[in-house]
Image: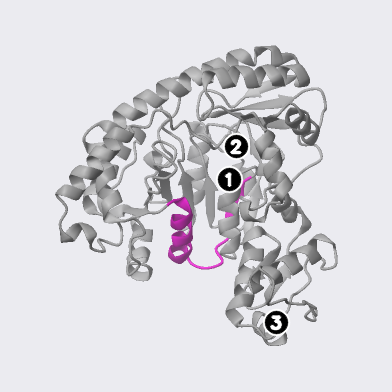
Amino acid sequence: MKELPIHIQLHPEDNKTLYIQIYEYIRDEIRAGNLLQNEKLPSARFLAEDLQVSRTTVDMAYDQLVSEGYLEARPRRGYFVSAYEELNVIDEIPYREMRKPQDKKEEESIRYDFSPNAIDMRYFPYATWKKITKNILVDANSKMFSLGEPQGDLNLRTTICRYLHGSRGVNCEPEQIIIGAGNDYLLLLLEKILGRHVHVAMENPTYIRAYRIFRSCAYPVSLIPMDENGIMVECLRRTDARVAYVMPSHQYPTGISMPIGRRLELLKWAAEEKDRYLIEDDYDSEFRYRGKPLPSLQASDHNGKVVYIGTFSKSIAPAIRISYMVLPYPLLEKYRKECGFYSSTVSRLDQTILNEFIQDGYFERYLNKMRKQYREKHDLILNELKPFEKAFRISGSNAGQHVLLTDVKGRKEEELANMAKEAKVKVYRMQDFRIEKNSDDPAMLLLGYGALSFEEIKEGIALLKKILV
């Protein structure tokens, strides 16, 4: 296949950087249909020479296009235009810096935003956090400001180890834990540990950000359908995937909790081959409102096949960019060999503050308070949604911070979302979380309640009732 000529006119005097100009030109050509799926683009070296720019500038543009799903990087072959199904997702979830001015105006007109990702920060113990920080700084010495251990401070890893065992049944030692600045970093680190171009399987719908990260690593990704019990293992078996990324305790965005039978099927699949693994993303396991918290998938793993990932961003605050990963021992050896020289991405000061916040009991008290708040909001929104039962099927409750409405009248998601927008209410479409879309998929809306006050939930649902029921 011959390389396509790309006729880009760069304008150095433009306010936009050169790599953004290259990125936007290729993106717009793909959207317009001038570059067709599976067509090969010029190599980064060739394009850099042709445009008389640095190779780094072209690499940055190509990397951005790969991250957003417009291009696919094929090992030893080059860059190709991605399949169209994957491009639709990116158009529906644009990057914040790429948004048009009118998008911001529309957001400003929204009165009630039922975001499934936002959390309530009104009860955060700012005074406690400030006090711990002050005390640590008063007693700080030179060690506090040193680089620290690559995996994270041992004290915090030990504290996390004990917390995970008590709350989630995770069986591990502090040496198996790696602390990182957010789940994104840990997933990127896994690319170094698992190896390049590993075939990954993901649920569909799924957490879009994780999908983009895997694609940016040039991982082949197979999308596996789900039923009422979660990822369908029989479909997983029909792929060549070595790794499956799952959220068994509370799948995002469907809210499905995987029963023990399906979990054992997954573990059996992983155990059948030496180099198969499961990535368990346990992003919001702290918030369950009926019955006991479900144990982690890792708790049932007796063969060292589960990589367990969790974060404090949901349970404490988004700005607490501290996540953790528990590696089974075979992968821990690979980490030490391939990545042991990487520096920790979380400052020792932040690690020490979090460690004391947990050890002194503040974290548990804060969690109990937030569980109570979210449980009351959860019960309130379900009560307010009772009149919706003749137009929607309500699901995904009893855990997390959002519920799902499935339309039973045959309407389209776009229609429902636009009707809500006209009423100055923002709801979220399930299709924004589907990598592959099917015309037979039912119209589903996500309503998050975490960041809204009780009054805002009532008022927002009342507006939706007028137009959707």
Q: Work out whether residue 173 can be spotted.
A: no
Asked whether 383 or 139 is in front, the reply is 139
As drawn, 44 above or below 384: below
Residue at 75%, 74% (x, y): give it.
Answer: 40
* Circle 2: element type: loop
Please state which amino acid type lies under the numbered disc 2: Pro
Q: Work out whether residue 41 can be spotted.
A: yes
Q: Which callout, 2 or 1, points at the residue further toward the start of the chain?
A: 1
| Residue identified by numbered label 1 | 207
- Residue 122 pos. (x, y %): 43, 29
Asked whether 386 or 336 is in front, the reply is 386
Instruction: Please state, as top left, top right, bottom left or bottom right, where the N terminus lies in the image.
Output: bottom right
- Label 3 environment density (alpha carbons within 10 Å; few <14, some 14–19, many ≥20): many
Please state which amino acid type lies under the numbered disc 1: Tyr
In three-dimensional space, the C-alpha distance between marks 2 and 3, rounded to whole angstroms, equals 40 Å
**Image side of residue 216 versus residue 174, left or right:** right
- Residue 33 pos. (x, y %): 85, 63
Q: Which quadrant holds residue 353? A: top left
| Residue identified by numbered label 2 | 253
**Image side of residue 424 versus residue 183, left or right:** right
